[in-house]
Amino acid sequence: MARNWTEDDMLVDSITGNMFDALPMLPKRLVRVDAITRRFDMPFSHVQILCMLSSGSMSIGEISRGLGIAKPNITPLLDSMAERKLLERVRSSRDRRIVNVELLPAGVEMAAAIRGVIAEQIAEWQETLSASEAKRLNSALACLISVSRQLPEHK
């Protein structure tokens, strides 16, 4: 019978160590979150919502689960963003109980601008990373996204 990979203590310990070591680096080194929030004068949660909605409309419940924030706590975030004319709430045509959130043109522009700032930050890496390392990082990020989408959401 094949061994379950989680029985491989060395692999589990290695993933745990890498995840632990990466946590403090993600918002400071890979993407300088503080620079983005200052430049666009908005909290990181708003940046996250813009990034999520750039792929299309989402329900409030989907946003809540994606951010790991309770639905009642999402409401003030969405209210603040709606006041800035970045997004709007739209009732589902199939089920009036469901409220979807969509980006308005200003939100689409803001999401594109945020993406541009991230591109500027990444362009600076060429002074430090080789093309080979950048390609490895790109593959690792694609893998991280794929794995994240497969894992169950924690409540």
Image (cartoon, rainbow, N blue to C red):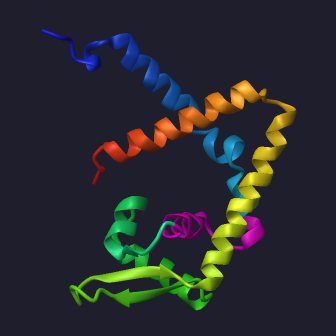
Q: Say above or below: 41 vs 52.
A: below
- Total of numbered circles in the picture? 0
Quadrant in the picture for the C terminus: bottom left
What residue appears at the point 44 percent right and 24 percent down from the top-left corner? 15
- Residue 38 within the segment the image draws in magenta: yes
Percent coordinates x, y for residue 95 in the rendering: 21, 85
Percent coordinates x, y for residue 146 in the rendering: 42, 42
Q: Say above or below: 41 vs 92.
A: above
Q: Say above or below: 99 vs 26.
A: below
Asked which quadrant contains residue 72, the reply is bottom left
Quadrant in the picture for the N terminus: top left
Say which of 19 and 106 sits in front: 106
Say which of 76 and 8 sits in front: 8
- Residue 40 within the segment the image draws in magenta: yes
- Is residue 42 in view from this perspective? no
Q: Main secondary structure of the magenta part?
A: helix
Q: Say above or below: 139 vs 32.
A: above
What residue appears at the point 18 percent right and 11 percent down from the top-left corner? 2
Q: Is residue 95 left or right of residue 76?
A: left
Percent coordinates x, y for residue 64 in the rendering: 37, 67
- Is residue 123 in view from this perspective? yes
Percent coordinates x, y for residue 54 in the rendering: 54, 68
What residue appears at the point 69 percent right and 64 percent down from the top-left corner? 114
Query: Over which residues does the magenta segment extend?
Result: 37-54
Residue furthest right as drawn: 127
